[in-house]
Image (spheres, coloured by chain):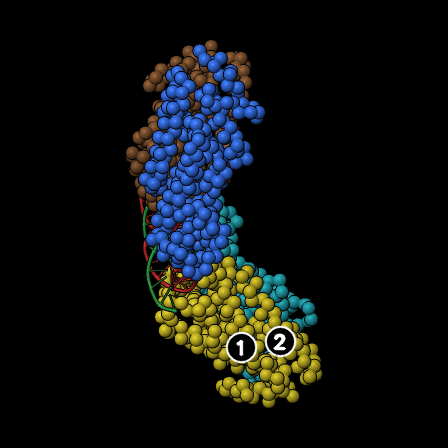
Chain colours: A yellow, B cyan, C blue, D brown, E red, F green
Amino acid sequence: MTEVTAKAARTNKKVGRTASREVRRQQLIDATIESIAKFGIAGTTMTTVTGYAGLSIGIVNFHFDSKENLFEETLRYLAEEHCETWRKRLQSPDMVPAAQLLAIADAHFDPAICNRKNLSLWFAFYGEAGYRAAYRELVSEIDTERWETSIEVLKTIIAEGGYQGLDAEQIATMLEGLYDGFWLNILIYPGDFSREEAKQRVHEYLAQTLPKHFAAPAKGASPCQEDHSRHAP
Amino acid sequence: MTEVTAKAARTNKKVGRTASREVRRQQLIDATIESIAKFGIAGTTMTTVTGYAGLSIGIVNFHFDSKENLFEETLRYLAEEHCETWRKRLQSPDMVPAAQLLAIADAHFDPAICNRKNLSLWFAFYGEAGYRAAYRELVSEIDTERWETSIEVLKTIIAEGGYQGLDAEQIATMLEGLYDGFWLNILIYPGDFSREEAKQRVHEYLAQTLPKHFAAPAKGASPCQEDHSRHAP
Amino acid sequence: MTEVTAKAARTNKKVGRTASREVRRQQLIDATIESIAKFGIAGTTMTTVTGYAGLSIGIVNFHFDSKENLFEETLRYLAEEHCETWRKRLQSPDMVPAAQLLAIADAHFDPAICNRKNLSLWFAFYGEAGYRAAYRELVSEIDTERWETSIEVLKTIIAEGGYQGLDAEQIATMLEGLYDGFWLNILIYPGDFSREEAKQRVHEYLAQTLPKHFAAPAKGASPCQEDHSRHAP
Amino acid sequence: MTEVTAKAARTNKKVGRTASREVRRQQLIDATIESIAKFGIAGTTMTTVTGYAGLSIGIVNFHFDSKENLFEETLRYLAEEHCETWRKRLQSPDMVPAAQLLAIADAHFDPAICNRKNLSLWFAFYGEAGYRAAYRELVSEIDTERWETSIEVLKTIIAEGGYQGLDAEQIATMLEGLYDGFWLNILIYPGDFSREEAKQRVHEYLAQTLPKHFAAPAKGASPCQEDHSRHAP
DNA sequence: AATGAATGAGACTTCATTCAT
DNA sequence: CATGAATGAAGTCTCATTCAT
């Protein structure tokens, strides 16, 4: 379901008594995201979820078998939404490796991905011991895909640039750390630290580490996406 | 409460029926940490807490007014314990700025701080929307102290080294991001990512950014803490 | 509804969307019997019933007003099915009284009556306090008919045989007790107690009580009738 | 717990906040019996049970882990109460075999055992498919004990009397059938069939089958228990 | 006539909190 | 001080019933 449709469903609650199964499921997932972002996992009940969805309490066990399952499907949706964002960008055939790496990096700070609601969700699942296992099971495949794509791209870049003493895995580790760490800081100190600043810091790190491929961004300016190819050799 | 008392309470749980108020409180905070680490915030009940503490269920509302209050006091204790660690190290009078920065950085990956139990706790509180506000209130002062100390130290280092185009705030932001991001990865993928590796990545980042002050660490080896002063100019 | 139609409905469940009202009702009653036999009254829901019937959940409240009503109609059907069995056998005009009594007795242990599904049903309704009143209302007429027929037949037999000190009501009471008690034992211990054995025990009781009319059954170990009189004081 | 204490607990609901664990359990079992007798298994809820017990809803899961468990314990209590009744009577050392058999038979129609509440319970558990398995597991041991005791006693009686062509197992089967069948008739037609009449019918059956040991009871009179030994040879 | 998504009352259960001991 | 039985609000889930299609 596209976000537009989801929005529509949310705005126009009365979709008729028999909205399609998929529409209802998405409506409930959206409501779950909203509720967890606001009340946390412990504070999210069937009542808060169905309240946001504008539906009756009994419907969750009808479309999802249990609260547990609803939460897992919500997590899965979130992971896939994130993954789709950079995967789609990577499909452009004319992308040079550096542009690909930037696509992955910038996807983390895209407003569609990196917003209060989504970040709340991620850290809610990270934080709740009971869901960390579920997280690993559901998300590790997607995490691994991103990791391996990054490694491959980095190896190409290192080889192209003839960089000495650089290790693709170490750089990838740094990047993953920065993504997560910046997400957390954006979540906790939204007034002091912005999506834009996070992106800039990552760009600077790349310019400092792989200078032949990534030019230092202008001070205070965020690089346009169209310019990415410029950085390619 | 001093750390000694805390240790005592943890070791010798059965302190007799008339343990001092402070001992009982610490006993319950320790049990809360243990329970949240194992079961998460949602899975932690008065029963799990008092079970770990070896006390009766009625005692919590006696020493803390409510579960809410117990959790807040637990968070406060955790924040202070972390802060004490690096604050104590910084009090050594003969520390050069680079050593001070390393002290702060390495404190994050000290086994006493960076262990499964503590990390679980931090991310539990980060993740639960209802506690993020409490977190900010309790921890921002401590976070700010660390931030300002880092900034000051970094400014000194940049001036000393005559580094061009470096900004203390940007480096501090990177470091804070790495601390948090690495913590999260250690928590979620404990098999794939270690405390030691995290520390090394941070050291490398410093060596790459401020090369006159931080030598590149030997491959595969973790730098000894005693050697910190060596890195100073 | 005739038994033929019932059979038809049971065999050919898919009767098309426009099956007659009666066919649908019988289809649902059959499904109810099946469900109660398997899951009990408490475990029988509209979903289990319509599942067995291969129909949609909404249909019950269309053909029966409520679950309550469906259960009552099911009970009524069961009672009538049982009654038909022995009533039909009694209609043979050339039956002597002893044969009539045996017809009633044996009807209880006929495979069409005395099977797991039916016994489950009877005892489900007996057991559920809320349905005992309904049972009495629906079944007492049928029970009474059987009782009075038995009494009449017994009186004829006693008179014919010139039996001394025998009371038709007492014998009828014994027989009714044996029917019910054996049914229960067949239901609960199906491996240890069979329909056949039950029938034999009843036959023996009749041979022992009314020896001139009922010969001792052949082999299978049963006391000879000749010996009974010897035991008299 | 003696019945006196149980009664006391029921009458004097406020036993203090901390009645002994056993007292509370028995209070709840009594309330469960009362509720199932009145509303059936399907109609018995935690609310009806705790309502009868005069306690709060939450207490059941405190003393029993679940409704399921409460029901099983209730069934077990009932089975043991019945068993105790005849087991105790059999312990009298001066009992001749015929008296023993009568003790078992009459225990079934003792007012403490054979009353509306208890019979409702038995048939509730028999009738509910989900509990028949539990019944067998819990009660079969007790049933078997009674069966084997009866067989043994019957064999002695048959040998003593030199009865020809009698089989202990067949007589025991008849007796068990009569017990259950008469119980059911007492439950369903309490106005038409009494405990006393049932007992008399069983006595007559014994007198008819084993005349040297059991004298025919006087018409309309129920034999006193003290007289049992008289019937022994 | 038939479907099945939706509703919402009510079931079981959990658990923070209270309070007599 | 400490205990733990008891309370009852609130949570999840079930399911008879309704009603637009």
Front position in the image: B205 or C209 = C209
Q: Earlier in the sequence, mark 2 or mark 1?
A: 1
Residue A85 numbered mark, or none: 1
Q: Residues within 10 Å of mark 1 (few under 14, many from 20)?
A: some
Q: CA distance from mark 2 to mark 1?
A: 15 Å
What's the amino acid at mark 1? Thr
When asked about the image quadrant of residue A87, the answer is bottom right
Q: Secondary structure at mark 1?
A: helix
When asked about the image quadrant of residue A8, the answer is bottom left
Could you say where residue D160 lies in the image, as x and y percent from the top left? 52, 12
Could you say where residue D190 lies in the image, as x and y percent from the top left? 33, 31
Q: Are marks 2 and 1 on the same chain?
A: yes
Kindly identify which residue carries mark 2.
Answer: A150
Query: Mark 1 — on which chain does it sit?
Result: A
- Side of A120 relative to B102 (left or right): left
Front position in the image: B127 or B20 = B127
What's the amino acid at mark 2? Ser
Question: At 40% from the left edge and 23% from the top edge, which residue is drawn?
Answer: C157
Query: Mark 2 — on which chain does it sit?
Result: A
- Residue D93 visible in the displayed image: no
- Side of D102 relative to B231 (left or right): left
Q: Quadrant of the C terminus of chain C?
A: top left
Question: At 46% from the left edge and 19% from the top edge, which residue is drawn?
Answer: C212
Question: At 46% from the left edge and 52% from the top edge, which residue is drawn?
Answer: C9
Q: Residues within 10 Å of mark 2 (few under 14, many from 20)?
A: many
Q: Are marks 2 and 1 in contact (CB under 8 Å)?
A: no
Question: At 69% from the left edge and 71% from the top edge, which residue is drawn?
Answer: B219
Could you say where residue B232 lies in the image, as x and y percent from the top left? 61, 75
